[in-house]
Image (tube, grey):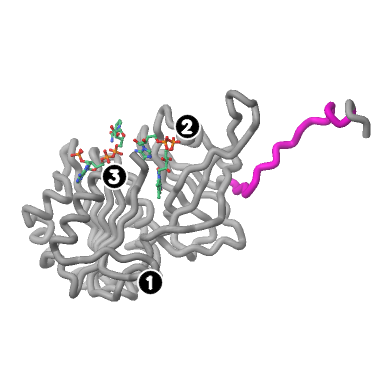
Amino acid sequence: MTDSAASAKPKTLVIPDAQTVTQVKHWTDRLFSFRVTRPATLRFRSGEFVMIGLMVEDEKTGKVKPLLRAYSIASPSWDEELEFYSIKVQDGPLTSRLQHIEPGDQIVLRPKPVGTLVHDALLPGKRIWFFATGTGFAPFASLLRDPQTYEDYDEVIITHTCREVGELQYGKELIDEIRNDEMLAELIGEGFHEKLRYYPTTTREESPKMGRITDLMRSGDVFADLGVPELTPETDRAMVCGNLAFNLEIKDMLEDYGLEEGANSDPKHYVVEKAFLD
Ligand SMILES: Cc1cc2nc3c(=O)[nH]c(=O)nc-3n(C[C@H](O)[C@H](O)[C@H](O)COP(=O)(O)OP(=O)(O)OC[C@H]3O[C@@H](n4cnc5c(N)ncnc54)[C@H](O)[C@@H]3O)c2cc1C
Ligand SMILES: NC(=O)c1ccc[n+]([C@@H]2O[C@H](COP(=O)([O-])OP(=O)(O)OC[C@H]3O[C@@H](n4cnc5c(N)ncnc54)[C@H](OP(=O)(O)O)[C@@H]3O)[C@@H](O)[C@H]2O)c1
């Protein structure tokens, strides 16, 4: 082929690590979730995150390159597809574009899962607390659907603090789905013996339980409402995922209860991960 014939040929964009979008659901004007096909070789532990993104043209060079961001996998490790729960930042380089994806579109997914919010980073315990704010709920959407969570603990408490009621809806529907799932419902039990406890709170819109989870712990409300004692290193384990200020504040509180931070290589009583970089 001559040079001129080669340049006349239409270019096909090759997307590295492409996965196809299968479902998109918009929850509020700032939040959406979506599902994509799962690479056959991808193995991950519930609670881990991967880098995902879109192919975007560089304004200066005109070159099309992957624009990637860290995302917690919201689906459990047994699921055939992968689910993500996302913010829409109107001027965000990725999410200003990602919020427009539709079934059939392709995204880039680097199949290298990592993260600290995994069961392996915690010592055995009786009760596990998942503390989330905003999209920090995503890793727990995975862990809450993992049978191991209920096999390892007698009690599983998920707290979710958001500004507004609509921002709790993804989590609320997920909890309903888990309670109605045949396999998980059997592990979780029913009524007085139910292992799963859901504690949603809002800070800027009226709801049945208002306040930051940190304040509600200090006042003792959370423990009174749930009928459980304050955390102790003997019985309690915790995973934390939210904004930086929240993570730091609750980390101090957990340390005051006597819990120590663990890691994959050194399991202890609690682990923390940022829901986004500030
Ligand atoms: C370990 C890790 C896991 C993450 N998992 C998720 C996830 O599951 N879902 C998700 O939506 N995001 C997640 N993020 C954040 C994500 O990587 C991107 O920041 C987000 O998708 C926005 O990308 P962007 O390019 O549009 O804007 P960016 O330039 O990345 O962010 C712009 C600004 O938007 C705000 N912002 C970014 N992400 C969020 C968020 N999630 N909630 C509230 N405000 C935010 C921050 O103020 C940030 O400075 C995670 C980040 C880390 C470090
Ligand atoms: N959510 C919205 O409606 C909205 C709208 C437009 C823009 N934004 C912007 O988007 C960004 C992220 O907003 P977001 O609402 O997703 O997340 P966020 O600001 O991290 O807030 C999520 C929840 O965490 C609580 N929180 C914050 N700091 C805490 C702490 N130290 N301890 C305990 N709880 C704490 C908040 O309570 P408080 O309400 O008490 O802070 C809120 O209920 C912000 O920069 C915001 O300005 C948000």
Measure how far apart labels 3 and 1 are at the Cα level: 27 Å
The answer to whether the residue bearing label 3 lies less than 8 angstroms from the nearest atom of ligand 2 is yes
Of 179 and 152, which appears nearest the observer?
Answer: 152
* Number of dots carrying numbers: 3
Mark 1 or mark 2: whose residue is earlier in sequence: 2
What span is colored magenta in the figure? 5-20
Q: Quadrant of the C terminus?
A: top left
For badge 1, the amino acid type reads Gln
Question: What residue sits right under mark 2 in the picture?
Answer: 93
At numbered mark 2, what does the secondary structure look like: helix, strand or loop? loop
Mark 2 close to ligand 1, CB under 8 Å: yes
In the image, taking residue 131 as reference, residue 64 lies left or right, namely right
Q: Quadrant of residue 119?
A: bottom left
**View quadrant of ligand 2:** top left
- Disc 2 marks a residue whose amino acid type is Pro
Residue 57 lies, in percent from the top left, at 60, 30
